[in-house]
């Protein structure tokens, strides 16, 4: 799931003619001029010719070095090999320095700024110690007419939209007496898709609504689930004739089947609150991390089975992704999840408002930490509107309360008790709450919801 860098990301080398301020003297030039000047002044005041002999080689070397002053700045180009890596996958970046001058540079110092979630390291042996955050200098030699590349590689440890660049370069010339002004490139955007948690649901959907799919429906039609044997009728296919029953009854009978249909799954992300600290892939997970990875896993599972999946956001932006199926929809879901972020200042919207845009036959999977009272009200409203709702608890199990005072532990236990009471009340309203645990998390809940959907409805007279 990676793609090469776009043409806009490859910046052309920057080459500029000497305008008088492109190259600045270094401290070495100042010390050389100072020492040579002091020796000459001392030689005149003291009348000593030996001091002139000492100052002459130093002055000549400075003049010879300044005579080889470059006329152009180094060219710099930044590119990336993997523009869309998966969370935990490797990312490559290349900083290319070009010398198009007739004079070679003594050395070039290259620095690349990047997001701390991109752990890029280079292979240069003369580079300084690694520093997180992308401010590590790399030193390379760039002879005249040659382009040298500094290659960096490393994993992208967290999902999201990250920045790579800008890259900067300083060239040193004239035997270390001159240094160029910084040549800076633009920054590149890097999309890191979330790593989908392992998820698999073996239970049937509560209600199948489409025309084709892999879920067994209660309607007769072309499918693979046997529903019984009936007499042959117009439109029945000969390959479905049950010859054993036909010979016994002396009338043609065919095997009746239930149609296979697809279902619509709505993944609703509760972004009203966030908790925990994100440590990237392999580290601690925040509520937002668990919600995004769980949403990607659920969408991948049902889209792979041919269902239609849509994604909604319960937050300030109230974004909505239309239902669709196929791999293209899966990539669209991953792109949509990159812009998910907590929004505690969102206005309260009831479940009835959300249910207006959700099909009555859809299964609504709500990923929520249940940290806000508005979340519980939204879940209850969705259930009252007649939707099949399953709440997935995304609060990390190892989350603890920081010790602020002596009452911190007591207040934390009271809060947990109140939260469990809220979960129990949601269960009474017909909203089961299950903790996210990857594969099989929704099996027991879907089994109960499917039985509830198949149960006969009371008729009011």
Image (tube, helix red, strand yellow):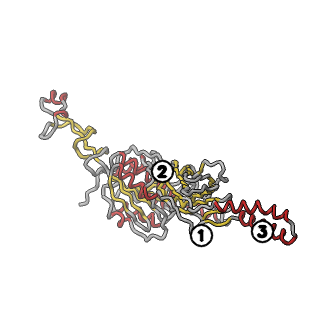
Mark 1 is surrounded, within 10 Å at the Cα level, by few (under 14), some (14 to 19) or many (20 or more) other residues, namely: few
In the rendered structure, find residue 37 and report the number of the disc placed on it. Answer: 3
Q: Where residue 59 appears, x then y in whole percent?
A: 74, 63
- Which residue does the numbered mark 1 point to in the structure image? 20
**Whether residue 405 can be seen here:** yes
Residue appearing at x 49%, y 54% in the figure: 79
Q: Of the residues under marks 2 and 3, which one precedes in the sequence?
A: 3
Single out the mark in the foreground, 2 or 3. 3
Image position of 420 with respect to 343: above or below? above
Q: Residues within 10 Å of mark 2 (few under 14, many from 20)?
A: many
Q: Which residue is mark 2?
A: 82
Image position of 156 (left or right of 199): right
Q: CA distance from mark 2 to mark 3?
A: 55 Å
What is the quadrant of residue 237 in the picture?
top left
* Viewport quadrant of the C terminus: bottom left
Calculate the distance from the C-alpha at mark 1 to the C-alpha at mark 2: 39 Å
Q: Position of residue 288 (x, y in %)?
A: 50, 58
Cβ–Cβ under 8 Å for marks 3 and 1: no
Q: Residue at x 41, y 45 (%)?
A: 201
Q: 306 left or right of 436?
A: left
Q: Nearer the viewer, residue 156 or 92?
A: 92
């Amino acid at each position: 799931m990676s793609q090469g860098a776009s043409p806009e990301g490859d910046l052309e080398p920057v080459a500029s003619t000497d305008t008088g301020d492109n190259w600045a003297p270094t401290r070495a030039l100042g010390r050389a001029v100072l020492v040579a000047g002091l020796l000459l002044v001392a030689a005149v005041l003291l009348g000593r010719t030996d001091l002139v002999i000492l100052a002459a080689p130093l002055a000549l070397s400075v003049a010879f070095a300044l005579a080889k002053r470059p006329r152009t700045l180094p060219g710099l180009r930044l590119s990336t090999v993997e523009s869309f890596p998966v969370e935990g996958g490797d990312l490559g970046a290349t900083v290319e320095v070009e010398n198009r001058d007739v004079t070679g540079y003594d050395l070039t110092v290259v620095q690349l700024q990047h997001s701390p979630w991109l752990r890029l390291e280079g292979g240069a042996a003369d580079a300084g110690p690694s520093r997180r955050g992308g401010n590590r200098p790399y030193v390379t030699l760039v002879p005249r007419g040659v382009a040298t590349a500094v290659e960096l590689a490393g994993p992208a440890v967290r999902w999201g939209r990250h920045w790579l660049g800008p890259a900067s370069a300083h060239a040193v010339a004239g035997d270390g007496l001159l240094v160029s002004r910084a040549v800076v490139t633009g920054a590149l955007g890097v999309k890191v898709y979330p790593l989908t948690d392992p998820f698999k649901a073996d239970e049937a959907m509560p209600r199948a609504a489409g025309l084709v799919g892999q879920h067994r429906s209660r309607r007769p039609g072309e499918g693979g689930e046997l529903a019984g044997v009936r007499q042959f009728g117009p439109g029945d296919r000969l390959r479905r004739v049950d010859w054993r029953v036909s010979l016994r009854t002396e009338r043609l009978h065919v095997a009746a089947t239930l149609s296979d249909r697809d279902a619509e799954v709505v993944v609703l992300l509760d972004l009203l609150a966030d908790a925990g600290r994100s440590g990237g892939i392999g580290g601690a997970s925040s509520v937002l991390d668990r919600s995004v990875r769980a949403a990607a896993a659920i969408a991948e599972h049902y889209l792979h089975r041919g269902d239609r999946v849509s994604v909604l956001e319960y937050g300030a932006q109230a974004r909505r992704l239309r239902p669709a199926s196929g791999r293209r929809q899966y990539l669209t879901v991953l792109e949509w999840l990159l812009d998910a972020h907590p929004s505690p200042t969102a206005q309260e919207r009831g479940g009835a408002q959300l249910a207006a845009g959700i099909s009555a036959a859809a299964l609504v999977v709500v990923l929520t930490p249940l940290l806000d009272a508005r979340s519980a009200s939204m879940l209850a409203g969705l259930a009252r509107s007649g939707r099949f709702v399953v709440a997935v608890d995304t609060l990390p199990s190892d989350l603890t309360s920081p010790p602020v005072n002596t009452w911190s532990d007591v207040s934390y236990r009271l809060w947990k008790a109140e939260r469990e009471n809220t979960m129990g009340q949601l269960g009474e309203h017909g909203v089961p709450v299950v903790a996210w645990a990857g594969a099989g998390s929704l099996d027991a809940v879907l089994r109960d919801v499917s039985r509830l959907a198949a149960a006969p409805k009371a008729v009011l007279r």
